[in-house]
Amino acid sequence: MPQPGFRLAVAACILSLSVPIARAQSNDALNGLPPSDNLYKTVAALDTELFDAYNSCDLKKLGSLVSDDLEFYHDKTGLAVGRQTFLSAIQQNICGKVHRELVPGTLEVHPLNGFGAVEFGVHRFTHPGDPSSLGEARFISIWRLKDGAWQITRAISIDHHPVAP
């Protein structure tokens, strides 16, 4: 099992490589699969499924889409490890308080041969109690395909900042 420092170094490497890529538009085929590609369509559908569960607080569905050993890196809260830790944080901090949507034109999907795919994009967060409170962040999700099921094994959410309505 890799040491925590090694995992952090890998995450930092992924982040350093992702900065210019995450800002690119999905219609730039040089930076990812085209939206017509089957893997792109699969991951886009998974993103929708994941965040429909997130937005509706369907913890059972959300839990089925993340691995038991999930590592979630967040620029504001640091590292959270494990499915249950993730689900507890969602239940306590997100349910009924935050809504997430993908910013159109920002989704990129890249294959990870023999493993799954990596997804890059920008997401926007709104607060039902205060529609004028908007925020955005960049994200990276590592999806694993194992025994016919897709799950996120690593997630990074960075560059959280307010945006004007």
Image: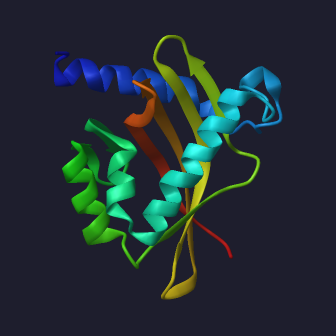
Give 85 or 147, whichever is nearer the viewer.
147
> Closer to the camera, 130 or 75?
130
**Percent from the top left, x then y, of residue 155?**
41, 39
Q: Is residue 31 above or below residue 96?
A: above
> What residue lies at 35% left-to-right and 47% top-to-bottom?
64
Q: Position of residue 100 (x, y in %)?
A: 54, 64
Tell which residue pokes out farthest to the top in this image.
114
Residue at 41% of width from left, 36% of height from top? 151
How many numbered marks have been drawn onto this rendered protein structure? 0
Horizontal side of 89 relative to 135 (left or right) equals left
User: What colouring method underlies this structural image?
Assistant: rainbow
Kindly tell me whether residue 42 is visible in this rendering: yes
Q: Residue at point 44% right, 62% down?
A: 54
Residue 160 visible in the shown view: no
Quarter of the rendering containing residue 30: top right
Q: Left or right? Give the position of 97 relative to 135.
A: left
51 above or below 29? below
Tell me residue 80's x, y (percent). Answer: 24, 45
Residue in the image at 64% along x and 31% along y = 109
Q: In which quadrant is the N terminus drawn?
A: top left
Q: Is residue 105 above or below residue 112?
A: below
Q: Position of residue 53 (x, y in %)?
A: 45, 61
- On screen, residue 152 versus residue 48, left or right, reads left
Image quadrant assignment for residue 24 = top right
- Quarter occupied by the C terminus: bottom right
